[in-house]
Image (cartoon, rainbow, N blue to C red):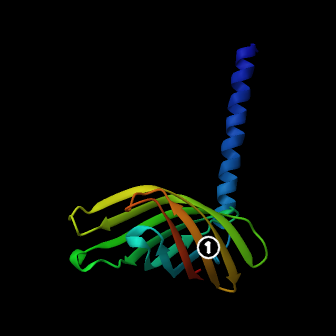
Amino acid sequence: MSESSRIADGQLRGGFLWVSGLLIGLTLLSASPAEGQLRVGGHLVRADDAFSGTLGVGVQAGIDPPLLPFEIVASGEYFFADCPPEESGCGLYGITVDANFRIIFPMVLPYIAAGLAYRHIDPAADNQAQSVVGPALGVGLDLGLSGIRIFGESRYEFVDAPEKQFVWRLGTMFEVF
């Protein structure tokens, strides 16, 4: 057997082992119990810079894949913009999608969040509404109780809505299954 045949044979075996391992891993993940993997909830939110700081409310859903140290979380938020009387139609809302990388301790789950933020701002004064998308980074802390999580999060969004800003969240998430 030539050396190139041995190399090709070794690569074929290595590829087969890699694919086999991947399939076994996916089978184990899919066979894991689903308890506590899907969460829904709501939160209060504050954007520090938009409209000189504004409060809002949001809804949130997350999925926690078994055996992996992160959770995928999507949030939708509406802010109650304090507009001057001449700008009576202003508003701010948006959505975010994050991967929360967890550091696991009993009942306390600190995490680092990285994701994308979409914001739509309507300043109303010049009627030039805009939608912007950009990266976001944050840190948070979950207090895990039986069937419920209370969380607090601070994040920085690199989106111009109307400027890059800090966003603070405080809320709860309930385990669906």
Amino acid identity at mark 1: Gln
Residue 57, horizontal then vertical, whole percent:
44, 81
Residue 159, horizontal then vertical, whole percent:
43, 57
Residue name at image x 26 percent, y 63 percent = 129
Looking at the picture, tell me which residue is in the foreground, 102 or 141.
141
Circle 1 crowding by C-alpha within 10 Å: few under 14, some 14–19, many from 20: some
Q: Quickly name the residue at label 1.
A: 37
Residue name at image x 74 percent, y 28 percent = 10
Looking at the picture, tell me which residue is in the foreground, 167 or 102.
167
Q: Is residue 135 above or below residue 30?
A: above
Looking at the picture, tell me which residue is in the foreground, 157 or 118.
157
Q: Is residue 176 visible?
A: no
Left or right? Give the position of 78 relative to 41: left
Q: Which image quadrant: the N terminus? A: top right
Q: Is residue 112 visible?
A: yes
Quadrant housing residue 53: bottom left
Residue name at image x 21 percent, y 64 percent = 126
Residue 167, horizontal then vertical, whole percent:
51, 69
Looking at the picture, tell me which residue is in the foreground, 134 or 69.
134
Q: Which image quadrant: the C terminus? A: bottom right
What residue occupies the far top of the structure in this picture? 2
What residue occupies the far right of the structure in this picture? 106
Task: Report the number of numbered marks.
Answer: 1
Determine the secondary structure under disc 1: loop
Residue 32, horizontal then vertical, whole percent:
68, 68
Q: Is residue 152 above or below residue 120?
A: below
